[in-house]
Image (cartoon, rainbow, N blue to C red):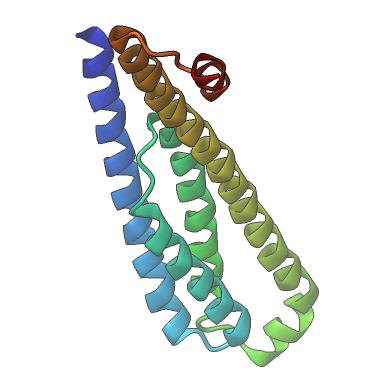
Amino acid sequence: MALWTGLSQAATVVQLVSADVGGLISMIVQAALTARQNRSECEQLARRALMIAQLLRHVQEPEAAQPLAGLGDALRNAHELVVSCKGRSAAYQFVMASRTAEKFREVRSKIDSYLILFLVISHIGITRRLERIYNILVTDDSTRGQPSSPLLQLQVCT
């Protein structure tokens, strides 16, 4: 019973954090629409954020809560960066072009590192589900008195 309670609490945390991330994504898209400098980089970040939003709906693993929080931090950095592109002068943009480009690379890299974690978490979740299915099938076969492995079934038939 405690396990189910813990899992439901973790699921709630995942839902709350993903809602926060969804709000950040919306803010990034809105800020990118109003950016004056580095418009293409801002739009690229906004497109990436929209793709993340579409994928987050499917994240259900309790282990995803912490990486989601980290992704939220990375998206906050992205939002701050996109907002900073709103009203800078041409002189400022020229002087800070190299630093701004570096900030865009850092934000993209940080977002990508969290997305890689989701691949690992997803793999773990799929493996767990397959193990549960396998255990159910093995249990069903053993209660019926049938061999559980196809190799054993071939030996019985011959």
Judge whether 39 appears above or below 78 on screen: below
How many labels were placed on the picture? 0
Instruction: Tell me where residue 29 appears, x and y as whole percent.
Output: 41, 75
User: Is residue 29 rendered to the left or right of residue 43?
Assistant: left
User: Is residue 48 rendered to the left or right of residue 53?
Assistant: right
Instruction: Tell me where residue 60 appears, x and y as whole percent.
Output: 35, 40
The residue drawn where x is 58% and y is 38% is 120
The residue drawn where x is 25% and y is 25% is 9
Instruction: Tell me where residue 77 appears, x and y as whole percent.
Output: 54, 57
Judge whether 9 appears above or below 155 on screen: below
Instruction: Tell me where residue 104 appears, x and y as whole percent.
Output: 67, 67
Quadrant the C terminus occupies:
top right
The residue drawn where x is 46% and y is 61% is 52
- Residue 40 appears in which quarter of the rendering? bottom right
Relative depth, front residue between 158 and 115: 158
Quadrant the N terminus occupies:
top left
Instruction: Farthest residue to the front: give it.
Output: 158
Judge whether 82 appears above or below 135 on screen: below
